[in-house]
Amino acid sequence: MKSNTSWYLKLSADDCTPRVILVGDPARQAIFAEHMSNVREVANEREFCTIQGVYNGQSVSVITVGIGAPAAVLVLEELWELGARIVVRAGTGMSVGIPLGNFILVQAAIRHEGVSQSYLPINFPAVADIDLFHSFLHTLKEKKVAFEAGVILTSDSFYTDLFSHSIQNRHPIRQQQTLLQRYAEAGIISADMETSALYIAAQYLGIRCLTLLLATVDGFELRSLEEKERQNKERELARLALEGITRYKQKE
């Protein structure tokens, strides 16, 4: 017998709003809830918790997806099945030559994850929806926040491609130069573990998709934002993501 809810999210079509924000950290979902009215939990299964609320007079869903491309794309597939067509990832990313605390509007992402190749060949570019990108660009400029727009690197492998262990005597054998360092020479501004897969799957499914990141960790100096500043910046990230997704007017 066919279920009335999606397989993992446990959502029905009536539970899902047309505009959805994806977050990795459940604590970040709670920050979004602070900025919305009429908030309610709709479903909670495994790492996938869905809340729904109202911002700027529009209904918005915020869903936790955990870390990594496979789970994020799984959620995107089920959102497509449920009818959502505008999806924004609001997360954190590494700083590559930009100040910590700056926001990052992701124009495109280098595909160093495995999931997207099951959708489109590796030579297909992973780019943001152009209309959604320009709408968010306008919002960030209007709000006068410090941000960068550009290309980032997406990889499945955090400790081999993107970051180095900081624990003494715990250094696995690897190449002298990380993938992050090699692409930094080409001008990338950040790195994450989800965006390129989301952009490719969204292109395939017909979903308008965008990633907005907060630079919280310096990929080279191995330092991060102080906790209090990070909390303040994550609240700002929530406001910007909600403002951007509710302001966007979808073109038919």
Image: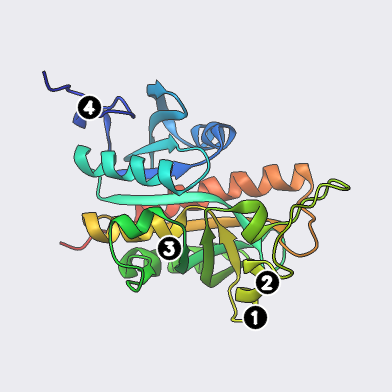
The residue tagged 3 is 136
- Indicate which label's residue lies in the foreground, 3 or 2: 2
The residue tagged 2 is 181
**Residue extending furthest bottom?**
186
| First-in-chain label (4 vs 1) | 4
Q: Amino acid at mark 3?
A: Phe
Give the crowd class for mark 4: few <14, some 14-19, many >=20 residues within 10 Å: some
Q: x, y (%) of residue 77? A: 28, 44
The residues bearing labels 3 and 2 have C-alpha atoms spaced at a distance of 28 Å
Res 56 seen here: no
Numbered badge on residue 12: 4
Give the crowd class for mark 1: few <14, some 14-19, many >=20 residues within 10 Å: few
Q: Nearer the viewer, residue 88 or 10?
A: 10
Mark 4 residue element: loop
| First-in-chain label (4 vs 3) | 4
Mark 2 residue element: helix
The residue tagged 1 is 185
Give the image quarter of residue 213.
Answer: bottom right
Q: Amino acid at mark 1?
A: Glu
171 in relation to 134, above or below:
above
- Indicate which label's residue lies in the foreground, 2 or 4: 2
| First-in-chain label (2 vs 4) | 4
Q: Nearer the viewer, residue 178 or 10?
A: 178
Mark 3 residue element: helix
Q: x, y (%) of residue 23? A: 49, 42
Q: x, y (%) of residue 143? A: 54, 62
| First-in-chain label (3 vs 1) | 3
- Indicate which label's residue lies in the foreground, 3 or 1: 1
Q: Nearer the viewer, residue 38 or 201?
A: 201
- At x 50% / y 65%, what residue is drawn? 105
Q: Are marks 3 and 1 in contact (CB under 8 Å)?
A: no
